Every structure is written in C-alpha cells, then in structure tokens.
Image (spheres, rainbow, N blue to C red):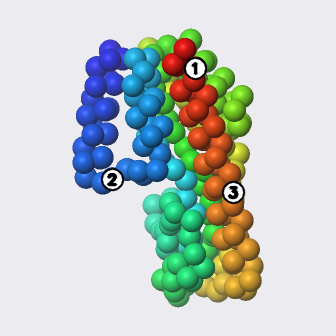
C-alpha cells in the first residue's frame, strides 16, 4: 500500500517537474528524500514573500488573491508593482512571509519519529506529524519564521514606503534564515541515511 502510493505520487511529481510546476530551489531535498524506501514527499515549497488582498463582503478564503508573490528575494520595485494591482475597495492588504514547507509521507511510526527528530533538533521547531493512517504518516517540516503584517484597510494603504521596505527587508532576511535551516536539516538527513 505504501509503495503503491509512493509510486503514484512520484509519477505526479515527475509530471510537475516536466511541466515546470515545482520550486526548483527545493528539489535537491525533495529528490534526496524520495531516494529513501521509507519516505516520499507529497508537497513542498521553498518559501515566499508576497502581498495578499482580502476583498470586502465575500468569503476571503475563496476570494482573497495574491497581488504578488515571490519565491526569490523580492525587490522594492516588485512590491510596488504588486501594490499597483490592488482593487479600489479591498477590505485588507497584508505583507506575508511563508516559511519553506515540506510534507513527507513516512512508512510507519518509527520512520516518522526519526524524521521528526532530525527536523526538530536541527532548527525546524514548528515541524509536526500532520496525519496518521494505516497507509502512512505525514510529517510536516516547517520553521517558526513567519510574518503577517497588515498594510492596508478599506481600500487605503496605512503604512508608508519606508515601512513597506522594512517589511520587505525583514521578509527576505527571514526567508534566507529559514532556507538555511532547511538546508541544515537536509545535510543532517543525508548524513543519517548515508551511514
């Protein structure tokens, strides 16, 4: 059951790779995990910064939208261009930093525990077991790096350009630190499984 699920998931991953639908910067770790018999990745993201718009009087879970999101270290010009795309009458705008994240299917409790210990003891302190089933355990790799800062209300920016640039600098710095933590976990994972 686990191996069949792994085969099907990796087939979908190959399609995503072939069609340029993956974060290339995280593939070094995705590929390394998928080499191991007891693990496979189900989703991943290298992390991103962005500007998110939440409209008025509708379900924001469905109708919120990214004005701009960057998996690279964004520039002030990119951020200002994204802000120019805001609608005239939004409810809220947020500057957002999302940490790198990986979801990894584990064959059993022992393999899940080993993976979680590697993550937790090497900086990914927000990592956890996300689900348990007879088929597999899902471990989430996640740092504590996050930033959600309101920057606009009722169709108007409520911060100046200096503060927007501070948020962008802070977001890019946190993203860099989070990626460094993820790489540290990669090195430890590689060491543990090459013994």
Residue plotted at (53% across, 27% down): 190
* Position of residue 18 measured from the top left corner of the image (x, y, whole percent): 24, 48
Image height of 188 relative to 96, above or below: above
Which of the two residues, 140 or 190, is positioned nearer the viewer here?
190
Q: Which label belongs to residue 21?
A: 2
Which element carries disc 2, helix, strand or loop?
Answer: loop
Residue nearer the viewer, 135 or 167: 167
Q: Nearer the viewer, mark 1 or mark 2?
A: 1
Helix, strand or loop at mark 1? helix
Quarter of the image where the C terminus is located: top right
Q: Position of residue 43 (x, y in %)?
A: 43, 40
Give the alpha-carbon distance from disc 1 to disc 2, as whole Å: 30 Å
Q: Nearer the viewer, residue 51 or 154?
A: 51
The mark nearer the N terminus, 3 or 2, is 2
Q: Which residue in the structure is indicated by mark 1?
A: 192
Residue at position x 25%, y 52% in the image: 19
**184 and 34: which one is in front?**
184
Q: Position of residue 85 (x, y in %)?
A: 48, 83
Q: Nearer the viewer, mark 1 or mark 3?
A: 1
Q: Are marks 1 and 2 in contact (CB under 8 Å)?
A: no
Mark 2 neighbour class, 10 Å CA radius: few under 14, some 14 to 19, many 20 or more? few
Q: Earlier in the sequence, mark 1 or mark 2?
A: 2
Q: Specify whether 127 is left or right of 69.
A: right
Q: Which mark is residue 141?
A: none
What residue is shown with label 3? 174
Label 1 neighbourhood size at 10 Å, few (<14), some (14-19), many (20+)? few
Please report contact status of discs 3 and 2: CB closer than 8 Å, yes or no: no
């Amino acid at each position: 059951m686990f191996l069949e699920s792994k085969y099907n998931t990796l087939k979908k991953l190959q399609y995503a790779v072939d069609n340029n639908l993956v974060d290339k910067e995280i593939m070094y770790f995705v590929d390394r995990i998928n080499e191991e018999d007891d693990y496979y990745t189900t989703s991943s993201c290298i992390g991103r910064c962005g500007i998110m718009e939440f409209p008025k009087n509708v379900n924001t879970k469905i109708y919120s939208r990214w004005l701009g999101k960057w998996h690279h270290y964004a520039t002030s010009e990119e951020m200002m261009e994204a802000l120019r795309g805001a609608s005239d009458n939004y409810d809220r705008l947020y500057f957002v930093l999302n940490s790198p994240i990986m979801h990894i299917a584990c064959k059993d409790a022992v393999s899940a525990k080993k993976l979680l210990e590697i993550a937790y003891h090497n900086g990914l302190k927000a990592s956890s077991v996300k689900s348990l089933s007879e088929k597999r355990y899902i471990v989430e790799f996640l740092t504590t790096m996050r930033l959600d800062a309101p920057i606009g209300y009722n169709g108007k920016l409520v911060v100046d350009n200096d503060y927007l640039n501070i948020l962008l600098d802070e977001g890019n710095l946190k993203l860099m630190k989070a990626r460094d933590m993820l790489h540290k976990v990669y090195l430890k994972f590689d060491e543990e499984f090459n013994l």
